[in-house]
Image: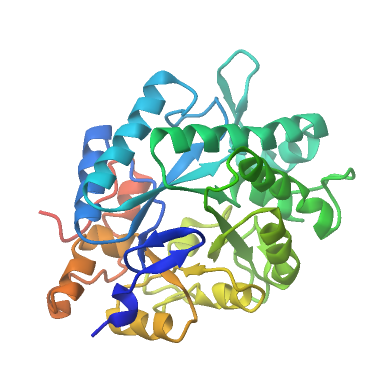
């Protein structure tokens, strides 16, 4: 039972022991509490944990791979996850909400300024930023990460999107130019680490109805997927684009459009039709029977969960032991998880005492 979920898979060059991945999640917890949470999730049986928001740049509000303390922190996370027989991936990103202030610090970018900010960056600076992805990947590998994921949102997503990118140079205009920066970022990782698996978090926006603002249009997926594949991507993690309401990106069960299980799989379907590389699906996934069907059919290669594995880190182990009926199912209430994120009290679950 649940043979597809529990079967190993070659996920773009890394062998995962099963098909369940913990999706990158901003927890808002102390470092000790976050480490404890990761150990619980890894011990619960998932195949890989993706650590979200690992900055590709030396400047950031998050711990930095470029600094001794930050590097040691990420190395500690990698070691802790490996001790639980779980792989670990670093999600490398470049922010468009904070920028280098020229003195080693950061300056904030307001939401209404993002379009102007990404549209005015000199081309030479963008090329320098792309090279940082290669350096950050090298540092992540040295810290013990098994894989890197390039986040196609934030700076990358804004440059891909006609809603933010108003450039008239080689980084703006048509899809080829808007995709130039992401190609350079992936190529920098591949050039620095020819053998490391490179996942790409492809963020998709759609119209009619309109959801997501950054990222690529659903209709542009047939162009972007082969371009990214040629640049060195080995797998795709597909979801809704950011820079929109948090209630859309992390929808509750009452969402008018994304209320059903597997709510973002329509985007991974579009990617699947363009590539033979592994595709990871996300979006309110909780039900082992539903997931078994999607994996067994080949619709997706892996499934990424966040809220469900926070609700019950033992989700995989309970399936493996033949006790799926004991799973604490996430009801997608967006209570203590999303509200905890918004009020800065940390991501928790209604099941916690």
Image coords of residue 73 (percent x, y): 34, 30
Image coords of residue 284 (percent x, y): 38, 70
Split into 4 quadrants, where in the image is the C terminus? Answer: bottom left
Image coords of residue 112 (percent x, y): 66, 42
Q: Residue furthest right?
A: 168
Q: Is residue 307 left or right of residue 165?
A: left
What residue is shown at x 43% (from left), y 76% (from top)?
A: 262
Q: Note whether 62 is above or below 233 in the view shown.
A: above
Q: Is residue 296 left or right of residue 125?
A: left
Q: Note whether 283 is above or below 243 in the view shown.
A: below
Residue 130 occupies quadrant: top right
Split into 4 quadrants, where in the image is the N terminus? Answer: bottom left
Between 96 and 51, the one nearer to me in the picture: 51
What residue is shown at x 12% (from left), y 75% (from top)?
A: 326
Image coords of residue 195 (percent x, y): 55, 48
Between 278 and 40, the one nearer to me in the picture: 278
Q: Residue furthest left?
A: 353
How many numbered circles are shown?
0
What residue is shown at x 52% (from left), y 42% (from top)?
A: 92
Asked which colour scheme the image uses, the reply is rainbow
Q: Is residue 321 left or right of residue 288?
A: left
């Amino acid at each position: 039972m649940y043979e597809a979920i529990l079967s190993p898979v070659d996920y773009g060059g890394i062998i995962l022991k099963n098909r369940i991945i913990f999706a990158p999640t901003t927890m808002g917890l102390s470092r000790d509490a976050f480490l404890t949470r990761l150990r619980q999730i890894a011990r619960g049986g998932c195949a890989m944990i993706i650590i979200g928001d690992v900055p590709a740049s030396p400047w950031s509000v998050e711990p930095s791979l470029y600094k001794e303390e930050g590097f040691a922190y990420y190395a500690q996370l990698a070691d802790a996850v490996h001790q639980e027989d779980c792989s670990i991936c670093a999600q490398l990103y470049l922010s468009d909400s904070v920028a280098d202030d020229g003195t080693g610090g950061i300056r904030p970018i307001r939401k209404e300024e993002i379009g102007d900010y990404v549209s005015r960056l000199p081309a030479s600076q963008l090329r320098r930023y792309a090279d940082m992805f290669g350096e950050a990947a090298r540092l992540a590998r040295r810290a013990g990460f098994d894989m890197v994921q390039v986040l196609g949102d934030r700076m990358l997503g804004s440059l891909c999107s006609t809603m933010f990118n108003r450039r008239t140079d080689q980084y703006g205009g048509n899809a080829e130019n808007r995709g130039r920066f992401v190609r350079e970022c992936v190529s920098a990782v591949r050039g620095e680490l020819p053998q490391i698996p490179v996942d790409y978090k492809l963020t998709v926006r759609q119209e009619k109805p309109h959801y997501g603002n950054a990222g690529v249009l659903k209709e542009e997926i047939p162009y972007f997927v082969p371009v990214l594949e040629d640049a060195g991507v080995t797998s795709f993690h597909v979801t809704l684009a950011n820079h929109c309401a948090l209630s859309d990106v992390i929808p509750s069960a009452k969402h008018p459009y994304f209320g059903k299980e597997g709510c973002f799989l329509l985007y991974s379907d579009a990617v699947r039709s363009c590539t033979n590389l592994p595709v990871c699906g996300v979006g309110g996934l909780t039900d082992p029977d539903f997931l078994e069907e999607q994996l067994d059919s080949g619709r997706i290669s892996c499934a990424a969960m966040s809220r469900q594995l926070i609700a019950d880190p033992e989700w995989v182990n309970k399936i493996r032991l033949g006790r799926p009926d004991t799973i604490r199912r996430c009801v997608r209430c967006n209570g203590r998880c999303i509200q905890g994120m918004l009020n800065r009290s940390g991501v928790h679950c209604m099941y916690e005492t």
